[in-house]
């Protein structure tokens, strides 16, 4: 089967939840299908400046065809126009102008799709919000699948998005919360809908200790006592020459970044829109109230950070370093109020690190309640008290960590997720 995927940005260097989800899925689908990604030359979502060369490339088995954007974004002009359009009567033409100002605006991609859509058996569109999806769904809706990554935000109230959610042959959701939100907001939708989610690779077991085994893993219903050599089932024994101080969970990341004591970790775009300003304010209040620890932030810095000694910028990390950072953390912060999945929360759970999540995100609360692997806060005082509890109570952290690993194993295995996609592809093809 030939599968076409349309997304606003694509590449290993691109930071973004939907972009990462798209890349992970494309790289796994290409083992059984001919997968071609149609995307722009942008790496940066703020300006949509053309940074990648135009033309086709091959990345980890996936054909990637890039098209140059016709304009870059003037963020101040876009913000002014957004404020006007959200609060005043307007026309569809005004909303198309909003799409152009938002970016990416890439007529060449849509023109290519119009000329060549017949060669694809299925077309997948990632993220409802951007022009490539809005305009691309017009081309061949009968073979199109929308992976909407929708959540409650001002843009979704625009009339143009009613067409986006009614046109495709099928819609994929990442969580039940997303599905309920879309079903409540949009009455006119395709008959084919499914909550598919995303696969998470459980990291290979390392030599240092992880969580103590769950009761049913010991064989007799008891929990074994834990020492520095305790390993989960499937772990390899450490070589005899490895010094004991290097067997401590997260020691590599902690030593590299000179981190001592409790560590709260944030990962992703360090951006006010991701809740990072509020996170910094809340963590500062935690420290002022006598809380110990460091707030470590990894990812792309899109805002200035304070020079306080308890704030540490770890930068962009490799996949291996990301896992080490997640393991080093006492708790992982998920401060964004706008999430359709949160890969970062699931990655934290996969290594047995508890999550502290923003209660304004229904998706994050759903993960925490379904997994029993994290706490959530609605305001500054709750954040401070939850973090104090996680730092103080090691047994609670261990229990939440075990629950998180089991939750990811049960619901986010790649074989299950890919099977759901294959089933949906077959239905879309048969439906035509």
Image (cartoon, rainbow, N blue to C red):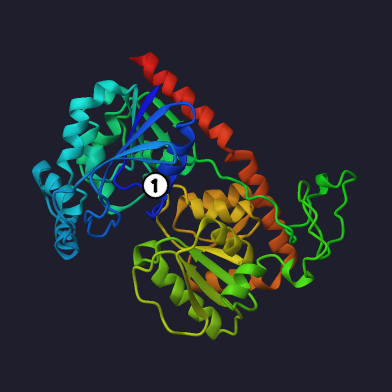
Quadrant of res 243: bottom right
Q: Residue at x 78, y 57 (%)?
A: 212
Q: Mark 1 sits on what residue?
A: 18
Q: Residue furthest right?
A: 220
The percent coordinates of residue 257 (x first, y second) are: 56, 75
Residue closest to the eye, 316 or 336 = 316
> Looking at the rendering, which quadrant does residue 376 occupy?
bottom right
Left/right placement of residue 213 relative to residue 354 reads right
Residue at image location 58% in from the left, 45% down from the top: 201
| Residue at (59% x, 38% y) in the render | 413
Visible residue check, residue 48? yes
Location of residue 118 in the rendering, given as x and y in whole percent from the top left corner: 25, 21
Placement of 274 over or under 69, stated as above or below: below
Q: In the rendered view, does 216 fall on the left or right side of 33?
A: right
Residue 377 shows up from this direction: no
Residue at the spot 45% in from the left edge and 75% down from the top edge = 280
**Residue 161 placement (x, y as % from top left):** 24, 40
């Amino acid at each position: 089967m030939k599968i076409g995927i349309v997304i606003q940005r694509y590449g290993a260097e691109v930071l973004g939840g939907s972009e990462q989800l798209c890349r992970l899925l494309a790289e796994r689908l290409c083992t059984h299908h001919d997968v071609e990604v149609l995307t722009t030359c942008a790496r940066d979502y703020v300006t949509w400046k053309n940074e990648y060369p135009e033309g086709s490339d091959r990345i980890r088995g996936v054909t990637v065809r890039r098209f140059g954007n016709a304009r870059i974004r003037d963020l101040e002009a876009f913000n002014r126009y957004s404020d006007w359009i959200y609060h005043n009567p307007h026309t569809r033409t005004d909303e198309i102008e909003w799409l152009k100002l938002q970016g990416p605006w890439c007529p060449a991609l849509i023109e290519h799709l119009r000329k060549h859509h017949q060669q694809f058996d299925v077309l997948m569109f990632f993220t409802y919000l951007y022009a490539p999806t809005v305009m691309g769904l017009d081309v061949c809706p009968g073979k199109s699948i929308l992976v909407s990554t929708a959540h409650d935000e001002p843009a979704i109230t625009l009339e143009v998005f009613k067409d986006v959610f009614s046109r495709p042959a099928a819609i994929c959701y990442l969580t039940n919360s997303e599905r309920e939100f879309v079903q409540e907001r949009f009455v006119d939708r395709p008959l084919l809908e499914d909550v598919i989610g995303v696969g998470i690779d459980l990291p290979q077991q390392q030599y240092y200790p992880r969580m103590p085994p769950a009761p049913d893993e010991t064989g007799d219903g008891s929990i074994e006592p834990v020492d520095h050599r305790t390993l989960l089932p499937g772990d390899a024994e450490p070589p005899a020459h490895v010094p004991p101080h290097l067997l401590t969970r997260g020691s590599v990341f902690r030593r590299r970044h000179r981190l001592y004591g409790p560590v709260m970790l944030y990962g992703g775009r360090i951006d006010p829109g991701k809740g990072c300003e509020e996170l910094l304010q809340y963590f500062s209040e935690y420290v002022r109230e006598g809380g110990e620890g460091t707030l470590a932030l990894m990812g792309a810095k899109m805002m200035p950070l304070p020079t306080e000694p308890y704030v540490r910028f770890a930068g962009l990390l490799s996949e291996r370093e990301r896992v080490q950072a997640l393991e080093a953390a006492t708790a992982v912060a998920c401060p964004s109020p706008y999430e359709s999945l949160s890969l970062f929360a699931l990655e934290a759970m996969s290594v047995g690190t508890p999550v502290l999540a923003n209660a304004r995100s229904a998706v994050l609360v759903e993960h925490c309640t379904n997994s029993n692997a994290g706490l959530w806060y609605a305001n500054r005082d709750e954040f401070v008290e939850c973090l104090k509890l996680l730092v103080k109570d090691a047994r609670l952290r261990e229990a939440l960590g075990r629950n998180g690993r089991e939750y990811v194993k049960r619901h986010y295995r790649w074989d299950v997720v890919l099977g759901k996609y294959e089933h949906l592809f077959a239905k879309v093809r048969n439906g035509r």
